[in-house]
Image (cartoon, helix red, strand yellow):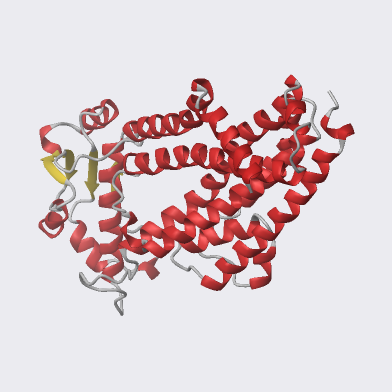
Amino acid sequence: MKNIFAIFKKELRRFFTDKRMLFMLIMPGIIIFALYSLIGNFIPEADPDYTYIVYVENDTAEFASFHTNEMYKTEIHSISEWDKESVLNAIKEGDVHLFISYEEDIINKIATYEPSSGDPAPRIEMYYNSSSMESSNIFTYYSGILNAYEATISNKFDINPGLTQYDMATQEDMTARVLTSMLPYMMMIFLFSGCMAVVTESIAGEKERGTIASLLITPIKRSELAIGKILALSVTSLVSAGSSFIGLLVSLPQLLKGMNFTLDIYTPGAYFALLAVLIVTVLIFTVLLSMVSAISKSVKEATSYGVPLMLIVVVLGLSTLMSTGSVKSIWLYLIPLYNSVQCLVGIFSLTFNPMHFVVTVISNLLFVVGGVFVLAKMFNNEKIMFSR
């Protein structure tokens, strides 16, 4: 145990006293925060106090209520003030947002129109500029309200009438859906990327520089060396992944502005489960990449060998993008990495299953123990460790 702690402390000191390496650990989080915040600032957002300029031809009292809406403040003008061609040019220039043209006496024509007659239906024309967000917004509003009015003219029954809220999705449900579609995938990528940079530098880098020989000739067991390195590299990788994760969480309000969401929907138990899943996942990544680095002659070679693992992680992460909940079969939680992804989905989607969590942690730890045994055997193989 003393030797394991000595290796653990040595590796941590090497990473956290090296300014260049420390900068590399926290830099991804800073970049993610800056990039996502910048993207959020460039996402157009509708101004609630914005006034939309709308011109109407042959307006009627029956449609006057359509011009009053809490979300869209409109300034209504009659077509008599300008001719039609001038209004259309103004829409192209962005000075006018919408032009609505009703047929003359449209209310009476609607009342007397028979669809079975085969005659053309009364026509409403709306001109707008799809390249303008404001013009598109007000066009969408009027299209929706006129289509709704058309549906009420001959309806025989009502579907969701009145102002009652029929959508039963809560704000917590919406938050869970957004986070479930994003975070499991991104967290797996962050964890693997952090491990890749740290592990390849520690093992393959030492082989490339020839400094690992001094460790191998010391009177300590290879299993102790493997455990000490894996624990230290896992902690270092967690710092890197944590930096990226924090940068993502801090930038989410800016990136998803306009959507009210809160992390208060998750209990302390959920955060504990999240931390446990991240730890065992990092241990697996560290073991796998340590074995890859052990058989590599250089950091470049280890990185190239790690690409297939990265592709597997990406595929596993992509499987969560359209997910609404974790898988039910407990046997699937025996599969390393896949079980981590599904546990993350369960946590973020509020469908967390304690039994699935326990199986995931135990199976992943057993995989790590097996990996440590294999890595110790590799450290004992001089042909592998001294190949340069």
Please tell me in which quadrant of the rendered image residue 7 appears: top right
Which residue occupies the foreground of this view, 344 or 280? 280
Instruction: Please say if 117 is above or below 231.
Output: below
In this rendering, position of residue 275 left or right of residue 51? right
**The C terminus - image quarter:** top right
Instruction: Name the residue located 46 percent from the left edge and 31 percent from the top edge.
Output: 26
* Residue 254 locus on image (x, y percent): 32, 39
- State how many labels appear: 0
* Residue 38 locus on image (x, y percent): 36, 30
Which residue occupies the foreground of this view, 134 or 188? 188
* Residue 88 locus on image (x, y percent): 26, 32
In this rendering, position of residue 34 left or right of residue 164? right
Please tell me in which quadrant of the rendered image residue 294 appears: top right
In this rendering, position of residue 336 left or right of residue 28? right
Instruction: Name the residue located 58 percent from the left edge and 61 percent from the top edge.
Output: 342
Which residue occupies the foreground of this view, 158 or 293? 293
* Residue 311 locus on image (x, y percent): 69, 42
Instruction: Please say if 56 is above or below 350.
Output: above
Instruction: Name the residue located 19 percent from the left edge and 63 percent from the top edge.
Output: 108
Q: Residue at the bottom extreme?
A: 157
Instruction: Name the residue located 30 percent from the left edge and 37 percent from the top edge.
Output: 133
Which residue occupies the foreground of this view, 132 or 182? 182
Q: Is residue 318 visible?
A: no
Instruction: Please say if 223 is above or below 306.
Output: below
Q: Is residue 31 visible?
A: yes
